[in-house]
Image (tube, rainbow, N blue to C red):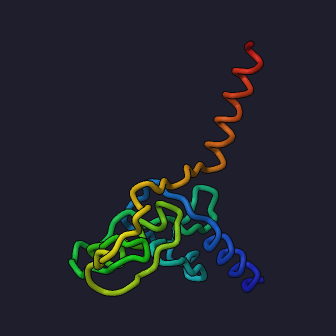
Amino acid sequence: MKLLYALFLFAAGWASVTSVPLKDEITDSELDICAAVICRPGRVCRILDNGVASCQCVQHCPSHHKPVCGTNGVTYDNHCLLHKDACLGQKHISIKHKGHCKKPKVKSPHHKYHQKPVVCFQHEKDRIRKHFVELLESK
């Protein structure tokens, strides 16, 4: 039964990622429940109001300066800030190498004309759809 509970906590912690304001201190009860939870980098185990363990984005990183280059081409002051940015932005960024990112030597001639596609989260798509339907129904 304990193994099943540990697996549940692990699954809940692995799949759940949110960015809510959290206190910096971890209580003893959180340590006990979170002992079986493994969170990905940039996340820390927290106990939600309903008592379920969940991996949450870290809110604060150490201020030491050990720059790393992310796979997104951005230089971060340290690895914690890279993982925090990845978690809060809900994107996959890993460490490409230690140190500052090197600027590309040659850019594509079409680079400045290339536009990135607009990306919306599902809740934003739903809200736009709802407003569009309301607009059509009002006419």
- Using the image, determine if residue 88 lies above or below residue 6: above
Q: Which sits in the foreground, 68 or 17?
A: 68
Please identify the quarter of the rendering in which residue 64 is found. Answer: bottom left
Instruction: Determine whether, in the image, residue 99 is placed left or right of residue 132.
Output: left
Is residue 125 something one can see in this rendering? yes
Farthest residue to the front: give it.
109
Q: Is residue 20 toward the left or the right of residue 23 in the image?
A: right
Residue sitting at x 54%, y 77%: 39
Q: Identify the residue shown where x is 73% and y is 84%.
A: 2
Give the x, y percent position of residue 118: 55, 49
Instruction: Tell me, yes or no, if residue 29 can be seen here.
Output: no
Question: Looking at the picture, how far across and down is residue 73, in whole percent?
Answer: 37, 72
Q: Which of the pair 79/14 is nearer the observer?
A: 79
The quadrant the N terminus occupies is bottom right
The one of 58 and 123 positioned closer to us in this rendering: 123
Residue 26 image offset from top left, x and y in percent: 43, 70
